[in-house]
Image (cartoon, rainbow, N blue to C red):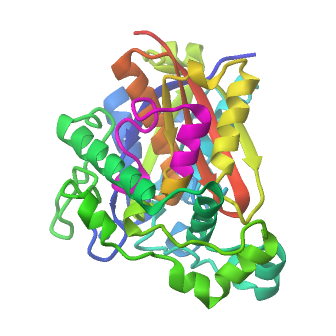
Amino acid sequence: MTDAYVLDYVRTPRGKASARGSLYPHSPLDLVVHLQKALVERTSLDPSRVDDITLGCASQVDEQGSNIARTAALLAGWGDDVPGGTINRFCASGVDAVGQTAARIRGGDLGLAVAGGVESVSHVPMFVDRGPLWHDPEIVRTIGSVHMGIAADLNATIEGFSRDELDAYGLETQQKAARARTDGAFARSLVPLPATDDSPGLDHDELVRPDTTAEGLAALPPAFAELGASGQDAIALAAYDRVPAIDHLHTVGTSPAMADGAALLLIGTAEQAAANGMAPRARIIGSASTSVNPVLMLTAGQTAVETVIARAGLTPADIDVFEFAEAFSALCLRFRRDLDAGPDRMNPNGGTMAMGHAFGATGAILVGSCVEELERRDGRYGVAAVSGAAGLGVAVLVERIPA
C-alpha cells in the first residue's frame, strides 16, 4: 500500500460570519481560488499534475452550491483536466475530505491531490438549505434532531460540569489563541486577503478576543435556555430520558464562534513529492468516521479519535498533539478528562471557540494546524477531529516526517 503525505497547507484567516466581517466582501469561491493561487505560487506546483480536488462544505446551496470544488478549479485556471468534488459530513466535512483523499492515495487511485474545505457563513447561513433534518417537524421528533447548543447543554448536564468549569475552558482557549496570534504561530500557512477598494483585507483571525476575562464570561447569560423552552428540551429529553431536565450553562463565550474561511492541503505520494520538488511534512496514517446518538451528537468526534488511535495500535498517551474542534466547552472538558489530554497537548494554540468555526473548512484547518504544531515541538503523532450534526464524527491521525 502506498503512503499518503501532507506536502503543504494553506488557509485564509477566519473572519466574523456577518456583514460586518472582513471576509464578507469575498464569496466562498473567492476564498478557495485565492488559496489555489497561493498554493501554486509557494510550491511552484503545476496544477495539471493534480489528480483531484475534494472540498468539504456543510451548506451546499446558493453561493456554495453546484460543486464549488470543480467551479473553483476552473476559475483558478487549473485547466479542464483537473476534476473536483464537494462532500458534506456537516462540520466534519473538511477533515473527512482529507481522510478520504488520503485513503484514495493509499489505494492507488490518486498520486497528487488537494483536499480541504470552505464555508462562508456570512453568505450562506447555517440551516439555510432547509434540509428535513432540521425543518421537517415529524423527522425532527422521530430522530430527535435538536440544535447543537441543546446537545451541548445536555452533555454538560450528563457529565455534571459546572458553569465555572465551562467558563474556565472558554477563557483558556481565548488566552491560548491570543498568545499564538501574537507569537506568529500561524504565519507559515496563513494567506492574507489583501485590501482592495471593496474589501478591508484580513491578515489575522479576527474573532479572537484577547481582552476576555473570567468576570466577563461569568456575566454572560445562558445562550440556549430560550431555545430549550421553545420545545427543543422536550424533544431532547423524549429521546434521552436519563436526566430529568437540562441545565442551560453554555453561553456565547463557551460556544464556537461562527466564521468564514477556507483551507487546502496538498497531499501526495513520496514519488509525487519528489517529482514536484517537495519534502513530505507528515504521513496520514488513517482516518475514522463514527456516529453516536443524534441527540448526544457532539461526542462523536471523541469516539472517532479513540477509534483511529486504536486502529493504529497506539494509545492516547502516544499522541503529542490533539486538535479537537471546540464544539462547546463541555465536550472539550469530557475529551480532556477521558483521554488525559492536558492543555499542553489539546488545542495548544486555542480553538474554534476563540478563532471561529467555518463549518466545512474547520477540519482541514485542524489537520494543517496539527502538522504545524508537531513540527514546532518536534512531536511524532497528532490527531485532528470534529464532531458534526446528527451524531457524526471524523478524525485523522498523522505522523510528522522529520526534516
Image coordinates of residue 63 in percent, x first then y, are 50, 71
From this viewpoint, is residue 261 visible? no
Q: Residue furthest bottom?
A: 230
- 172 shown above or below 184: below
Q: Residue at x 58, y 46 (%)?
A: 334
Q: Which is more toward the observer, 351 or 56?
A: 351
Image coordinates of residue 253 in percent, x first then y, are 37, 64
Image coordinates of residue 54 in percent, x first then y, are 60, 46
- Specify whether 257 is left or right of 24: right
Q: Which is more toward the observer, 345 or 250?
A: 250
Is 340 colored magenta in this rendering?
yes
- 322 shown above or below 263: above
Q: Which quadrant of the structure image shows residue 267?
A: top right
Q: Which is more toward the observer, 106 or 331?
A: 331
From this viewpoint, is residue 199 visible? yes
- Specify whether 174 is left or right of 296: left
Placement of the N terminus among the 4 image quadrants = top right
Placement of the C terminus among the 4 image quadrants = top left
Q: Residue at x 29, y 45 (%)?
A: 177
Q: Which quadrant of the structure image shows residue 191?
A: top left
Q: Residue at x 49, y 73 (%)?
A: 124
In magenta, the rendered stretch is 331-357
Q: Residue at x 38, y 59 (%)?
A: 30
Is 361 colored magenta in this rendering?
no
- Specify whether 244 is left or right of 172: right
